[in-house]
Image (spheres, rainbow, N blue to C red):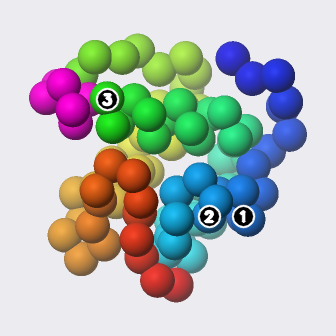
Amino acid sequence: MTSNPTPITAEELVDLVGEIDGEIAARVLALAPTFDEVAEALATIEDELAAGGPAHVSSSAKVVELREIFEDLALDPDQGFDGHEYAVMV
């Protein structure tokens, strides 16, 4: 899946998802995912939203955990979710 096993940095996470709540960022970073794993989790959520239902099997347990974090964010009306940016100020 990933050619670079180095965990994503906080800066890379913000570059990928936009502004993100510090608590959510900490949950993501605590898993030590790679950039590719975070990108996969986000892409599968976007694909499912576009398709109207589950359409993808995640490649790893870590991606499943990441999806759960981002889905929690998507379900929180105070934090919002537009499929591209998790716009939450710290």
Q: Residues within 10 Å of mark 3 (few under 14, many from 20)?
A: some
Residue drawn at point x = 77 percent, y = 57 percent: 9
Q: CA distance from mark 3 to mark 1?
A: 24 Å
User: Dot 1 lies on which element?
Assistant: helix
- Quick one: which residue is furthest to the bottom in this view? 90
Residue drawn at point x = 51 percent, y = 42 percent: 66
Boundaries of the magenta span: 48-53
Asked if the stretch drawn in magenta spans residue 52, the answer is: yes
**Can residue 65 be seen in this snapshot?**
no
**Residue located beneath label 3 in the image:** 47
Question: Dominant secondary structure of the magenta stretch?
Answer: helix
Residue 18, position as x, y percentages in the image:
52, 65
Residue nearest the observer in this picture, 18 or 56: 18
User: Dot 3 lies on which element?
Assistant: helix
- Quick one: which residue is furthest to the left in this view? 52
**Residue located beneath label 1 in the image:** 10
The nearer-to-camera label among 3 and 1 is: 3
Q: CA distance from mark 3 to mark 2?
A: 21 Å
